Image: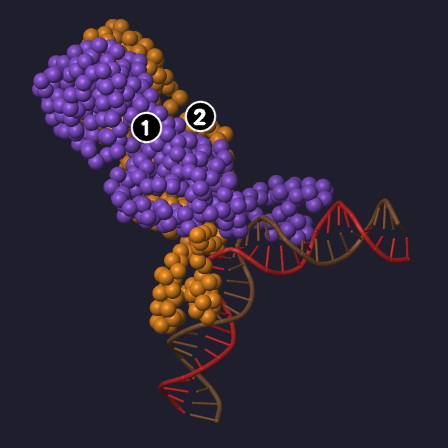
Chain colours: A orange, B purple, C red, D brown
Amino acid sequence: MQTKPTTIKEIAQILGISVSTVSRALHDHPSIGLTTRAKVKKLAGELNYEPNQTAIFLQKGKTLTIGVILPELSEAFFSSAISAIEDTAYKKNYTVLLAQSHDDEQKEKQLVEKMKNHRVDGLLVSVGKNTSSYQHFENLKKYNIPVVYFDRIPAIPNIHYVACNMEIGTIEAVSYLLKKGHRAIGMINGPQTMVATGERKEGYIKAMTKNRLKYDPSLIVSCDLTEEGTKKALDELLASKRKPTAIVTFNDYVALFAIKHASKLNIKINKDLEFVSYANLPLINYMENIPAASVEQFPYLQGQKATDILMDLLHHQGTGGNEPSAFYKVIIESQLVENKK
Amino acid sequence: MQTKPTTIKEIAQILGISVSTVSRALHDHPSIGLTTRAKVKKLAGELNYEPNQTAIFLQKGKTLTIGVILPELSEAFFSSAISAIEDTAYKKNYTVLLAQSHDDEQKEKQLVEKMKNHRVDGLLVSVGKNTSSYQHFENLKKYNIPVVYFDRIPAIPNIHYVACNMEIGTIEAVSYLLKKGHRAIGMINGPQTMVATGERKEGYIKAMTKNRLKYDPSLIVSCDLTEEGTKKALDELLASKRKPTAIVTFNDYVALFAIKHASKLNIKINKDLEFVSYANLPLINYMENIPAASVEQFPYLQGQKATDILMDLLHHQGTGGNEPSAFYKVIIESQLVENKK
DNA sequence: TTTAGCTACGCAAACGTTTGCAATGCAGTT
DNA sequence: AACTGCATTGCAAACGTTTGCGTAGCTAAA
C-alpha cells in the first residue's frame, strides 16, 4: 500500500510532454498554453502531486527554513519567544529548525555547524550565558547566512539584534515604589557578570537621583538567582540599617523565592514589604502572593520582531551583496505592568 | 568577502581526481588508497569543506529531520516535552522541525502537508483538542512517514503512541488522602468531553471502592478549567452536604485557582482543606501555597520515549516494509509525588 | 606467458526540480 | 513568397551528492 510520492517527471510522461512544461504549468508561467496548464494541474491534483522540497532546496540554494538556537526551551521566557517565532515564520511560509544549547558554548558551536549544513536561510539566536567567543556566529557571514540575535545578545559590533532595555523599566519600577511612599527600596540583583544586572542597577540609581534621593549602595545586593542565594540576599537586606519597605527583584523566580521566604518570616507581602519584579513567568496570574508590579520584557514581541527582521534581511539580500552597512538594533523598552490580583 | 561553500567537485578538480573518489575518500571507503584519502581530507580541511546536506537529503531521500506538531509551544507541559524531544533527537543526530497548531484542526492539516513536503523522516504529534479527523495523519502511512503520538493521542487503532495513564495516579492520589484520614474527598474534574476526565473519575471511584468506601457522586464536579469555573466548582463542593476536607483538582492551574479562592475564604490550605493535583507546572516549586502532592505526568519522559520510538521506527523500516503489524503503545504510569515545600 | 585476483580509481546515472536558450509552428505583414 | 513576431513547447544544464559498475595497472599463481 506504499506510495512513492508523485514526481513532475511522471506527470510529464503520462501527458507526453516535457518536465519543463509541467514545471512551468504548475507555476502558472505565462508561456504555457491555458489548455496544457489546465491538463497538468488536473492530473497533478488527481495524482496528489506535492513538490519535493528537498529537490527545490538544492536547486534554489534556499530552504525556506530558519534556524533557532536558544539556551533552554523549557524556560517560560524562551518558550514564549519560540512560540512567537514559529507563528511569525509560519505566516511567511518559513519553517523553524529548533535547537537548544543548554548554555553550553561547545554545543552551541556544533549547532551552528549543523544549521549551516542544513542550509538554513537565516538564524535566530539567543546566546548562552557562558558563551565567550562569537566567532562561530561571525563565520556565517561568509556564507551569507544572516543572524539576528535576541534577548541575550553578544557585546560585539555590527550585528542585528532585538533586545529589551531594562533601564527604563527599572526606573519605572523604582518610581512606582517611590510614588507609593517607599523611601527605603531594596534591590535583589543578579550576578555581576550579566549585562542585565548592570542595566538594572543603572536604572535604580537614575530613578533615585532623578527624585533627588541619595543612593544607598547597601540596598542593592547581588544574588546567584538560586533559592538559597535569594534567601541570603533577602536576609541581608532585612538586616541592613535602613530596612527596606519595598524590594525590586531580578526576576520572577527570585521574587517568588523571596516572597516565599518573607512569608515564612511572617512578613505581609505587599503590605509590610512590597515587591516589584521582572516578568519571566506568565504564571503569576495563578498565584496568590505575587509582586505588586512587574517589568514586562515582552518575549513574544521580541521573538516576533527578531523574526520580522530576519525575514526582511532574507528578502533584501537578493543582490547577494556584501556585509550590510546598516544594522537593525531594535530596543524594546521594558515596561512596568501592575499585576492584577 | 563572500564565500561560496566548498563543494566536493572543487576538491576533485584541484586534486585532479574524480568526484566519486573524493566522496569515498571522505567516507573512508576502503577502496580508496591511503595516500589519496589523506590528501583529500587534508584539502577538505583546509578549504573548510562541509557537505551540503540538501544535496544529501535529495540523494538519500532521508533528511535526518523529524517534525514535531503540538498545540501550544508556550505551555509548560509542551515546552518541557519539546525540550526532551530536541535533546533526544540531537543525540541521534536528528534535527527538529517545529510547528504549533494552536489547537486549530485546519492549521494542523496544513502543517502535516508542510512537514511532508519538507520530507521529514518522521513525525511526533500531540493532537489539537478540537481535532476530529485524523485522516491527515493517516495519509502519511502511504508515504512511509512514521508517526508517533504523545500525550494527546487520537482514539484510533493501529498507531504508535506514548501517553500517561491518569488512573493509577488518581488512585494513588485518593489513597494518599484517605491514608491521611480524609473521608470526604472532593474532585474538581475537567470537562466531560476529555478522555482525561474519565480516567480521573475512574481512578477516584476505584480508590474508594478498593477501600470499601462508598462513592458519593456529589463530590465530583466538572469545571471548564477557567478561573471562574473553578471558583464555582469549589463553592459547589464547599456547599455540599458532606463538605470535603480534601480536594483533587484536574490540573495545577485549577489547583492554583482553587487555592487562591479558598485562601480568600480564609481557609487554611492543606490544613482545613488539603489539595492534590496533577502536575502541569514546574513552577509550584516557587510558590508558597501549593497542593500537598501532585500526580506527575512526566512530560520530559514522554517526549523522550516518543522520540526513542520514532528513532527505532526510522531505523527498522529499512526494509521499506508495509504497515507494521505491531504498534508501540507505551503507557507511562502517572505517579503521585509529594511536593516539598 | 597467460590468467586470475587484487587495489585503486573513474564514469555516469540518479535524486526532483528550475530555467536559459533554443526550436517549432503559425498568423500576420510586406 | 519571404520575413517578422509571437505563442508554445522541448532540450539540457545545473544544484551537490552517492553509488553500481567498469577498468586500468599490478602482483602472484599456474
Q: Is residue A67 left or right of residue A284?
A: right
Distance CA(mark 1)–CA(mark 2)? 40 Å
The residue that mark 2 highlights is A130
Q: Secondary structure at mark 1?
A: strand
- Most foreground residue, A292 or A56: A56
Which residue is at 45% across, 67% downward? A14
Quarter of the image for residue B276 reads top left
Q: Is residue A184 above or below residue B322?
A: above
A98 to the left or right of B176 = right
Q: Pointer 2 indicates a residue of which chain?
A: A
The number of discs equals 2
Decide which of B127, A306 is in the foreground and name it: B127
Q: Residue at x 46, y 70 (%)?
A: A16
Q: With respect to residue A20, does B338 lie above or below?
A: above
- The chain carrying label 1 is B
Residue at image mark 1: B165
| Same chain for the residues under marks 1 and 2 in the image | no
Within-10-Å neighbours for mark 1: few <14, some 14–19, many 20+: some
| Amino acid type of the residue tagged 1 in the rendering | Asn
Can you say whether D9 is above or below A63 in the image?
below
On the image, the x and y values in percent for residue B118 come to 42, 48
> Marks 2 and 1: in contact by CB < 8 Å?
no
Q: B28 or B304, which lies in front?
A: B304
Answer with left or right where residue B12 lies relative to residue B53. right
Measuring from the top left, give residue B233's x and y in whole percent. 13, 25
Q: Where, quadrant-wise, is the C terminus of chain A in this rendering?
A: top left
Q: Amino acid at mark 2?
A: Asn
Residue A25 seen by the camera: yes
- What x and y, as percent, mark residue A24? 41, 65
Q: Residue at x 27, y 48 (%)?
A: B106
Q: Quadrant of residue B213?
A: top left
Res A63 visible = no
